[in-house]
Amino acid sequence: MSAVLVVNSGSSSFKYQLIDMGAERVLASGLVERIGEPVGVARHTVYAPQTEGPAPTMLEATATLEQPIADHTAGFQVMLDAFAAQGPSLEDHAPVAVGHRVVHGGARFFAPTLITPLVEINIDELSVLAPLHNPANLAGIVAARKAFPDVPHVAVFDTAFHQTLPAAAYTYAIDAEVAASHRIRRYGFHGTSHKFVSEEAAAFVGRPLEDLRQLVFHLGNGASVAAIEGGRSVETSMGMTPLEGLVMGTRSGDIDPAVLFQLARRGGMSIDELDTLLNSRSGLKGLAGVADMRDIGDRRDAGDPAAQLAFDVYVHRLRAYAGAYIAQLGGVDVISFTAGVGENSARVRAEAMATLGFAGVEIDPERNETRGRGIRVISTDSSRVVVLVVPTNEELEIARQTLSVSAS
């Protein structure tokens, strides 16, 4: 059995999954958080075997530990202790490789990459493009390489899938020398999810990936849409950072840049205050006071006009991008919804697709309202476009890419 450990590291936490790649089944998962605080928390869950499918269905054991966790290295020791105490045994299920999510690969990394000291230097240097993410990702890499020094470690970049964007899609229309000197261009994010979902969708409809024009809506607290032609990303809504594009839980998405000039000149807001405004106090939260689409729905049903406006703005942006990307592709064959909102909000899906009849989209209300665990069709049998709900699995995609590199 080949097991891969997948690590997603933040500044004060990291998540992990141990995946049996033979069955593509999660053996264990965990979260180590509040690193560096007086009391850290670690949760470790072991999953019982199941007969089919990659998603765990039954808890075999779960444990929570509270103690000081000084840094990521200490956090990985806590994880190792949890495996030893709760299982599964890392002697019986020793990882053949460790896969790491890294948010920003700039224009340098366009594929999963075996981590070397030089790659670590590059990830650190790219922190200027993702100061909140790359340093944290690197901290996890350094700690994991100490904990597992004898296996290959692979970086899987959120931006890599979008390295196929044409120049017309990734270029901002500003002074070319200024853009080049500061590496200002569109990079795109959620690439691991967009890749996984588009490939799963192609397999589900039984058509070659190379023959399909697809839209994938990754709608979570962060949200993006990608236009995918023949398995290659040709357009995506996020830009140099994850701030551009769709309305999100706390992020504004697209906004006239002159708004910032106005707020700085007339409102006296600093760069840091503007950063906080657009990333943490905007989106659904900025419009309605709550960031969760479920809360927006409850407030809409209760007659809250702010929640209604927030929902309408959210859907308006989805429709705008759908129409633009269908035009870029010259039509669309498959549209998929994924992530927390995309997988669970029938109302968002229905409203987002309501005006796309001109493109051949026809949603079946009953199918759309029916909940399920796996991939499911929500369009009618007569719809020219197949519309799907596809549960994303970024950890499995990272594990697949990690194994492909480490085994080569």
Image (cartoon, rainbow, N blue to C red):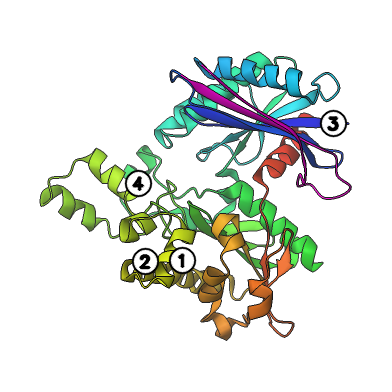
Where is mark 1, residue-wise? 297
Which comes sooner in the sequence, label 2 or label 4?
4
Q: CA distance from mark 3 to mark 1?
A: 43 Å
Q: In what element is the residue under mark 2?
A: helix
Reply yes or no: does residue 64 show up in magenta: yes
Q: CA distance from mark 2 to mark 3?
A: 48 Å
Q: Amino acid at mark 3?
A: Ser
Q: Which numbered tag is attached to residue 2? A: 3
Q: Is 341 drawn above or below residue 106 in the view shown?
A: below
Q: Position of residue 127 (x, y in %)?
A: 44, 31
Q: With 246 as the anchor, is 336 left or right in this view? A: right
Q: CA distance from mark 2 to mark 4?
A: 18 Å
Q: Position of residue 408 (x, y in %)?
A: 80, 32
How many numbered circles does the render carry?
A: 4
Q: Amino acid at mark 1?
A: Gly
Determine the residue positioned at 38% across, 58% down.
Answer: 284
Q: CA distance from mark 2 to mark 1?
A: 8 Å
Magenta stretch in the rendered image: 39-67
